[in-house]
């Protein structure tokens, strides 16, 4: 599709920083988006959550930017900003009126190159408290909030870096010292381990000059080799029951699947959509709409650089047994292996995905993040059409194949049930 | 060349930004349309807003408007519920319905190439919904299960109890949009049809459109599809009694919670052009963006929370002010004290630097509010919802610039009332109660998840 065929420039500074420029001058707004190639997958047991805690520390100021000023300077300019940490990467992003591009490049470069001297115990203790509260708010005090942690710790081997939550364990979060934080910075926060996208309304030559001006003086360090992990597998099914402050019982089924952008990744995503993506999807229609034995059901392919998993989650209506939901789910998978899916089901998913691509082009900041994402996983920022093609190529045979290949293997089964149930 | 990093770079030349033009016209059936043409992408975004929200829910049938919204797209014209959904999905069109306190919103996002067909389906929902008994009962069972599930959610409970206490039961904004179990069981398919007959009419609605279509082409398409929708509205008298609260704590026991969910606030004046910008600038300093006073204190200084904010909330016929946060149980009283301190303190006045920051934040952020099709649609929706002047966006920047330090300071005096604050805390009573009794001087009342008093003695 022509619309998805976007133009960009990509180059590298002498210190290794990758720079990607994408112009769109429809509004006087410009976005910057940096990916550091470090996430919770670079951690080890006993030190979980450092990548995410570190992301918080990056907002605590640097040599030329006092605490609280990073946010203040950008918001004063009418900008928006944030960061996020996932398994594979940490990103930082901001969007400002286009005449403030220099401001955000100055801020990003100051914390990339001049972070350590501004680090204090007071800032660290404060952000440990904040992150502890973030964990409480997002996981511990959420209904079903601990399910994910239980699921991944059972699905992956104890030393596999996808076996813990990105936010980390409370004990680990509260144990981090200034030494932990500064060695983490020295190891991973180098221009060589990062890429910056500038997207929106800017003059190309001026933007290049500004990037050179602010980032080129930061020394590049050694490249970090990612650790490879063997394809994970389970030898037998695992069954776990967890009691929580919930009204309705919920079942989780999790299988090992495939890495992001691997051959089977898009087939697994389309399978998830055919199972639960709409009212007419197979499991939704049967369990929620027709039989009303589930209140909700959802499936997805969750994949990263090292591994992937396929998850199906169903919440039971009151008085319905989880074993009944499980049986129906597995028999539908069986059914697809026997009879495949229809052309209409495939086309429905593909049409939705195609529209979704175009809807997602409305935001300059989400475009910037997508360019970085494609660059990270595929080494080609403008992969929109290639990505769309991955989905368009999926046929009924692929869907049958991925079920047989992954979803007939051992799985983790988690039941979350109300506290009061004995 | 040596780079001096110490100085913050200044902005390059001022940017130029021209506002999109808003078209305002009526369809043949009287339906008012607000539209903006945006050519960036081949997308159509449509929002039909109907004055049929939960404030119209009758006594003992709280939740009617929401259940209406859940049922209107369950089959229309020649299509069953499943067929209709399949048609939309096959087009890659997103269709959704939701209810809020004032209105029911029907929204559509489609590629322009699929707009004709999407609009045809949309018009069937507007004009020929089935409301069949079977579909209604299924949706009724669904919301009853959802109501059960909401008991798990501390944020939902805190919001519900806060509204109930702030507005009091004589006010139609006091009740949750989802209603109550006993009320929802009272609602019949006939009630849903009545709601449709009474409120779902062109003169009671506004259509908002953002698309790459020219006005003439758009108008013709809309007239063709919506011409047949032509019914009259019933007007009804609504009661929005308000009363003065006195400062008190309502504690909601959620056993085994590891956090306290906190809401602190009171009634405030409804939205008016005169006051709106003063209150906006005031809140930007007090509890709006990340660097506002409340968040910097509770998060960046004290480390009590992942985030805390305040807001002036507006309904069509009422306004309220509230602070919202969640904190570790051990810090509950401390957090409440800090919030009370900030609310007292803001009445002592703001600094020129704070005012400058707030104005700069609001003015410079303005262009980025016009980026996506849905942002534009929601801007138009707020113009319609609050009856804002046609030049609202053209005068926005000037209106923010005009706000002086005296305006902000008097807005604080006139709109923040520490003595009337309702303090709602949702958490584990056993751990919380002794702490609150020891640390806070306000009277404490226990309520259930809906805000009804529980009359056990607090000792």
Image: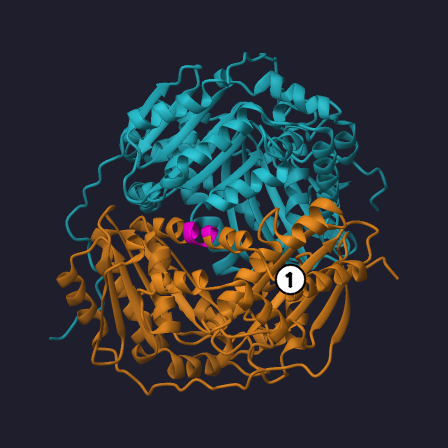
Chain colours: A orange, B cyan
Q: Which of A334 and A54 is in front in this view?
A: A334
Q: Quadrant of residue A236?
A: bottom right
Residue A231 shows in this picture: yes
Coordinates of residue A353 in the picture (x, y in percent): 45, 54
Residue B17 point in image, percent of width and height: 22, 40
State the residue at coordinates (51%, 71%): A264
B377 w.r.t. B170: above or below: below
Q: Residue at the location (43% across, 30% down)? A: B382
Picture coordinates of residue A56, whole percent (x, y): 46, 67
Where, quadrant-wise, is the N terminus of chain A in this rendering? bottom left
Provide the residue span drawn in magenta: A351-356
Category of crowding for the residue at label 1, using alpha-carbon neighbours closer than 10 angstroms: few (below 14), some (14–19), many (at least 20)? few
- The residue under label 1 is A339
Give the chain letter at badge 1. A
- Residue at the limit of the structure toward the right, as seen here: A422
Q: Can residue B245 be seen in this view?
A: no
Residue drawn 38% across the image and 67% down it: A373
Residue B331 among those drawn in magenta = no
Q: In this view, does A422 lie above or below B217?
A: below
Front in this rendered view, residue B285 or A318? A318
Quarter of the picture holding the C terminus of chain A: bottom right
Q: Is the magenta stretch mostly helix, strand or loop?
A: helix
């Amino acid at each position: 599709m022509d619309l998805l065929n976007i133009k960009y420039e990509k180059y590298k500074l002498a210190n290794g920083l990758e720079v990607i420029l994408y112009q769109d001058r429809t509004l006087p707004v410009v976005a910057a988006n940096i990916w550091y190639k470090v996430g919770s997958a670079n951690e080890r047991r006993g030190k979980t959550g450092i990548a995410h805690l570190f992301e918080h520390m990056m907002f605590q100021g640097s040599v030329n930017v006092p605490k609280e000023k990073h946010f203040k300077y950008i918001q004063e300019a009418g900008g928006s900003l944030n960061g996020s940490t996932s398994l594979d990467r940490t990103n930082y992003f901001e969007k400002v009126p286009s005449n403030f591009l220099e401001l955000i490049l100055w801020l990003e470069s100051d914390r990339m190159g001049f972070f350590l001297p501004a680090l204090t115990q007071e800032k660290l203790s404060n952000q440990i408290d904040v992150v502890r509260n973030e964990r409480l708010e997002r996981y511990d005090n959420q209904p079903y909030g601990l399910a994910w942690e239980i699921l991944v710790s059972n699905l992956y081997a104890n030393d596999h870096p996808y076996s813990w939550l990105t936010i980390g364990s409370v004990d680990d979060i509260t144990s981090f010292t200034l030494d932990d934080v500064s060695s983490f910075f020295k190891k991973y926060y180098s221009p060589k381990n990062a890429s910056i996208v500038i997207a929106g309304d800017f003059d190309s030559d001026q933007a290049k000059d500004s990037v050179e001006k602010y980032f080129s003086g930061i020394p590049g360090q050694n490249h970090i080799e990612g650790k490879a992990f063997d394809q994970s597998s389970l030898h037998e099914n695992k069954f776990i029951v967890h009691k929580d402050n919930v009204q309705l019982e919920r079942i989780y089924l999790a299988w090992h699947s495939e890495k992001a952008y691997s051959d089977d990744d898009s087939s697994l995503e389309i399978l998830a959509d055919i199972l639960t993506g709409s009212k007419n999807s197979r499991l939704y229609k049967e369990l929620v709409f027709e039989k009303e034995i589930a209140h909700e059901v959802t499936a997805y392919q969750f994949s990263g650089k090292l591994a992937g998993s396929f998850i199906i989650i169903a919440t039971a209506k009151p008085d319905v047994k989880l074993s009944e939901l499980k049986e129906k789910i597995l028999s539908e998978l069986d059914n697809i292996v026997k009879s495949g899916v229809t052309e209409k089901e495939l086309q429905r998913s593909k049409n939705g995905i195609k529209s979704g691509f175009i809807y997602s082009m409305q935001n300059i900041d989400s475009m910037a993040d997508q360019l970085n994402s494609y660059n990270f996983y595929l080494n080609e920022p403008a992969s929109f059409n290639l990505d769309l093609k991955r989905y368009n190529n999926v046929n009924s045979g692929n869907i049958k194949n991925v079920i047989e290949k992954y979803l007939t293997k051992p799985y983790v089964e988690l039941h979350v049930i109300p506290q009061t149930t004995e | 060349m040596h780079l001096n990093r110490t100085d913050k770079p200044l902005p390059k030349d001022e940017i130029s930004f021209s506002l999109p033009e808003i078209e305002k016209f009526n369809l043949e059936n009287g339906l008012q349309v607000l539209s903006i043409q945006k050519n960036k992408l081949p997308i159509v975004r449509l929002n039909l807003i109907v004055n049929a929200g939960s404030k119209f829910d009758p006594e003992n049938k709280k939740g009617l408007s929401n259940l209406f919204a859940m049922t209107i797209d369950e089959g229309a014209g020649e299509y069953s519920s499943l067929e209709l959904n399949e048609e939309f999905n096959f087009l890659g069109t997103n269709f959704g319905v939701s209810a809020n306190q004032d209105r029911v919103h029907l929204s559509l996002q489609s590629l322009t190439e699929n707009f004709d067909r999407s609009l045809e389906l949309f018009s069937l929902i507007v004009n020929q919904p089935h409301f069949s008994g079977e579909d209604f009962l299924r949706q009724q069972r669904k919301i009853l299960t959802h109501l059960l599930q909401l008991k798990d959610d501390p944020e939902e409970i805190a919001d519900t109890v806060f509204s109930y206490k702030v507005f009091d039961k004589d006010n139609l904004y006091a009740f949750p949009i989802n209603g109550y179990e006993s009320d929802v069981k009272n609602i019949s398919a006939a009630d849903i049809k009545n709601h449709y007959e009474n409120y779902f009419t062109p003169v009671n609605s506004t259509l908002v459109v953002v698309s790459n279509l020219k006005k003439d082409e758009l108008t013709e398409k809309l007239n063709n599809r919506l011409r047949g929708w032509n019914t009259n509205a019933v007007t009804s008298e609504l009661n929005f009694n308000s009363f003065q609260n006195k400062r008190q704590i309502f504690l909601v026991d959620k056993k085994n919670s590891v956090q306290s969910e906190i809401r602190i606030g009171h009634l405030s004046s409804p939205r008016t052009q005169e006051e709106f910008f003063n209150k906006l600038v005031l809140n930007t300093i007090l509890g709006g963006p990340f660097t506002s006073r409340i968040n910097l204190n509770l998060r960046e200084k004290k480390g009590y929370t992942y985030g805390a904010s305040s807001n002036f909330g507006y309904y069509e016929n009422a306004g309220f002010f509230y602070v919202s946060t969640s904190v570790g149980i051990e810090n509950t009283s401390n957090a409440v004290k800090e919030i009370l301190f900030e609310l007292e303190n803001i009445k002592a006045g703001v600094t020129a630097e704070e005012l400058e920051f707030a104005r700069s934040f609001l003015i410079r952020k303005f262009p980025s509010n016009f980026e996506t099709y849905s942002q534009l649609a929601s801007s138009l929706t707020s113009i319609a919802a609050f009856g804002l002047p046609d030049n609202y966006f053209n005068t926005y920047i000037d209106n923010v610039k005009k706000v002086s330090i005296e305006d902000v300071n008097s807005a604080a005096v006139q709109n923040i009332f520490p003595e009337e604050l309702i303090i709602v805390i949702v958490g584990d009573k056993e751990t919380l109660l002794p702490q609150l009794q020891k640390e806070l001087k306000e009277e404490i009342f226990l309520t259930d998840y809906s805000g009804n008093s529980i009359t056990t003695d607090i000792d």
